[in-house]
Amino acid sequence: MLRTNSVMETIQWFVFLLASTVAIPIIIASLYELNFVELSGLMQRTFFIVGLTSLLQGLIGHRLPIMEGPAGIWISIFSVMAVTGVQGGNTYTDSLRLLEAIMILTGIFLFLFGLFRLAQKLLFIFTPLVTGTFFLLLTVQLSGTFLQGMLGLQGSGSTIQLKQAGLAFLTFFIVLGLSTFGKGWLKNYSILIGIIIGWIAYTLFIGGQDRGEFSLFALPEIFAFGTPTFDWSAVVIAFITAIILISNLVASIIAIDQTLGNDTKDYSKQVSKGTMVAGINHGLAGLFAAVANVSLSTSAGFIGLTGQKRKAPFLYAALLLMVVSLFPPLVSFISSIPSPIANAALMASFIQLVGLALKNVTMEKLDQRKIIIVGIAYLIGMGSLFLPAEVFAGLPSIVQNVLGNGLLVGTGLVIILEQLWKE
């Protein structure tokens, strides 16, 4: 029987999984002009895949409490392809079917990298400078998304919604204040408390959402966007994405390991198993037409913020999310967590990730060589984040999807520069 603190930790992990997931399907639905029924189906499939992939990694992959969630590079890929697909004369459905294929192909590459232990042979390139740069670019990229959500600018919003923004910042400072100055359970469950208070306040001052009617039980649909379409551009994009995802996996493993206070010297086994399972997870995401998941470094921020270091509650929460996803009325209720409130809680957890970024970058003395490498990667990577996708319209689709992703550009630059410019 679960102890009381285990139940509370499971609930808080569950809420963190939800808060980290709920905004992404809304963003994707807006980009691809999905209707409410299609959004509900995407939300259900996303919840199911997040729970299943997190469980698989925790049990047979790297075996750490790291949430698998839709973020980082895949948000960028979905965003860029929404624009480039239309520019190339395709419909949004065509782009989504191609994305199913890209996710499956990426999964195949990742599985092979892990199976033949190629991933662990790449560990030497993921230096503290690389992981630190990755963390910082990730926070810059997603902080923009979170801030837009806090200000009510996601979906159809085009101007700041003052009431929503006020409640979002109230939630942000409640989570931050409790995690910093709170004691005992107030500190440990700061994210849960902040979201509950923010959700209640949002309902009182702004109102709830119309959730519609759904069947009591439903299994997630396979290939909901249609049969995947394959072409050579999908193969190239999938291969490049798989390489970058290995850097994401390594960075997340190191971040969690540091947060848990472990003194691991050799990550080879964890990286190989984690990469194999990441391949399976990407195949599942393509199969169920969800947004592919990555190992979220924000899990380190959550653990650092709440002090929850045990893995069992994380696994229970992942299993619970899978079960909940099978009941559309529950998915509808949970999905009604206001986007500004969810984004505010996530923004608060990112502060810990910024600290990890600075810690990794400064782990070794910053000489002139390192400063120049980091400076080039930061400036060009961050600059790429603010370029509209349309500026690459005249280039091949493969180049568009690479250059349109600032996280990929910056991380790739620091890897290349550090390997070419030796001390």
Image (cartoon, rainbow, N blue to C red):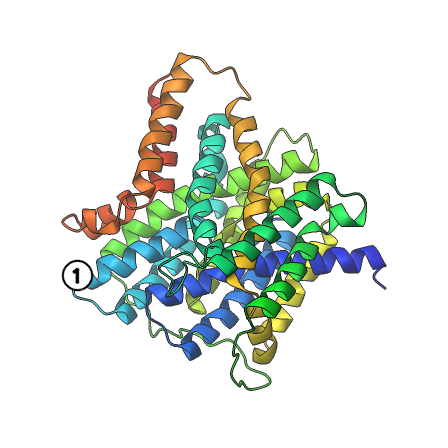
Residue located 39% across and 15% down the image: 369
Where in the figure is residue 2, as x and y percent of width and height?
83, 61
Q: Quadrant of residue 313?
A: bottom right
Image quadrant for the N terminus?
A: bottom right
Where in the figure is residue 49, as x and y percent of width and height?
53, 64
Say which of 34 and 269 sits in front: 34
Give the labeled residue for mark 1: 88
Give the total number of marks visible in the rendering.
Answer: 1
Looking at the image, is 169 positioned above or below residue 52?
A: above
- Name the kind of residue labelled 1 in the image: Gly
Image quadrant for the C terminus?
A: top left
Residue 339 shown left or right of residue 302 in the figure: left
Pointer 1 local density, CA inside 10 Å: few below 14, some 14–19, many at least 20: few
Secondary structure type for disc 1: loop
Say which of 250 and 273 sits in front: 250
Looking at the image, is 392 positioned above or below residue 222?
A: above
Residue 416 visible to the viewer: no
Looking at the image, is 110 positioned above or below residue 53?
A: above
Where in the figure is residue 175, as x and y percent of width and height?
65, 48
Looking at the image, is 197 positioned above or below residue 184?
A: below
Residue 256 visible to the viewer: yes
Residue 366 shown left or right of residue 258 in the figure: left
Residue located 40% across and 42% down the image: 244
Residue 186 shown left or right of residue 1 in the figure: left
Say which of 266 and 100 sits in front: 100
